[in-house]
Amino acid sequence: MARVTISKKACTVNPLKMSQPIGGALAFMGLSGCMPVLHGSQGCTSFGLVLFVRHFREAIPLQTTAMNEVATILGGLENIEQAILNIVKRANPSVIGICSTGVTETKGDDVEGYLKSFRKRHSELAELGIVYVSTPDFKDAFQDGFGKTVTKIIEAFVPEQTLSRRAPQRVNVLAGCHLTPGDIDELRDVIESFGLEPTFLADISGSLDGHIPEDFTPTTLGGVTKEDVAEMGSAAWTIALGEQMREAAVTLEARTGVPFELFDRLTGLAPNDAFVAFLSRISGRPVPRKLRRQRGQLVDAMLDGHFHFGGKRVAIGAEPDLLFALCQWLTEMGAEITAAVTTTTSPVLEKIMAEEVLVGDLEDLETRAKDCDLLVTHSHGRQAAERLNVPLYRMGLPMFDRLGAAHEVSVGYRGTRDLIFKIGNIFVDRVAEPTIDSWRQTNAGDDFQAGRAPDPISPPSSGH
């Protein structure tokens, strides 16, 4: 059990966390035909836009209500109304998702009231889905904003009804923000191998996986539709991936009666065994041969890799659910977590197998990682890794100095297997190759007992 502490520094130095509205915007990007909007200044939106473009290397739909000083003081009703009308005229989205920011939250804008007034004046837009989420960026973090937004999407589009008959093959999958588009594709493949039909929310694998669309669209390029979300009440089960999805799963169960099972991580052998066993039970099918073979490959990779992981000291900075998954898995591989820094509070933090988990920044991580063998965090940790002279393995968002961030996979049997190889190879590269001058005699027992290094091998004399 870890001791969870919160940094008391006067200011954040080299931030680790990202804000709630950006997390909410990412969740909206998992909806098909959606236009995310940040209710705040243009600068707030520009920051998030640049961050997503650099990470995914794709065109990102993200708009703003463009609040200035006067509008902020007087209220943002006119800005919200004009923004919605402009977006409908130019992009014709199915859904507009609005996330608040610090400036409008400080003012105390009644956005829910604004939207009710807007609906009365514009009955012609009755079919337009509008979802508002309160995501002040002066509290909480990226993961919190993502989780709140998924919950609001469910409240907005899933009707309150408990069906007497459900489709036994249908399952809802609430995917946390720590999962990449590649992770979601991998999990979809696993779930469908049992004959099940998953509906992912949010499904960024359909919109941010780097595909080339047939036609240009100013909204999201894919993802789950609001009609699919409305049908989530007919599923037999809900699978929640990550503690951040618990509130959304509870909300969905309260509205529809669909039971849920929460998996706090899917990186590692034991959690994937539990996941596959659950899928086998609810589908009534045996585990497919391909998954059995993938499991065998993972076990073999663990056997091959544990020699290189054993005793290694690792420092990690990540959102709570990703931090938990990595810390538990690395500990199972024989590594030691010497520093664990995260962005916000979560129930999973106390379960992490480390002495302390700190809610802090990258400066805190760097201070605690001085004697580590590996640093794991997103791309903003590259300077700290350089100063510490330790390798950096990039995980999380943003990852702007590497290609293929959206296609990284660290879940399932295959994802865990490949993660062993990637990180294990980093440890292998750090082992110095012996040279002829570095070999030492091994028969100097007195030297070894005394803790002294034996003398180097002397060249043979000419008389022998």
Image: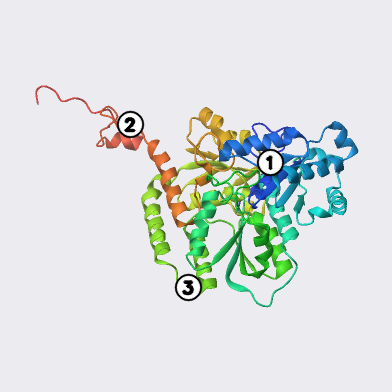
Q: Nearer the viewer, mark 2 or mark 3?
A: 3
**Is the residue 158 above or below the residue 336 in the image?**
below
The front one of 97 and 219 is 219
Q: Nearer the viewer, residue 231 or 318?
A: 231
Give how far across and how far down residue 351 sits, in percent: 60, 54
To which residue does mark 3 refer?
285
Q: Which residue is mark 1?
A: 62
The answer to whether mark 3 and mark 1 are in CB contact below 8 A is no
The label nearer to you, 3 versus 1, is 1
Instruction: Indicate the amino acid at tag 3.
Output: Arg
SS class of the residue under badge 1? loop
x and y percent of residue 329 in the render? 50, 52
Residues at marks 2 and 3, CA–CA distance in whole angstroms? 61 Å
Mark 1 burial class by Cα count in 10 Å: few <14, some 14-19, many 20+: many
Residue at image point 49% right, 59% down: 189
Amino acid marked by disc 2: Ala
Residue at left offset 57%, top offset 63%: 198
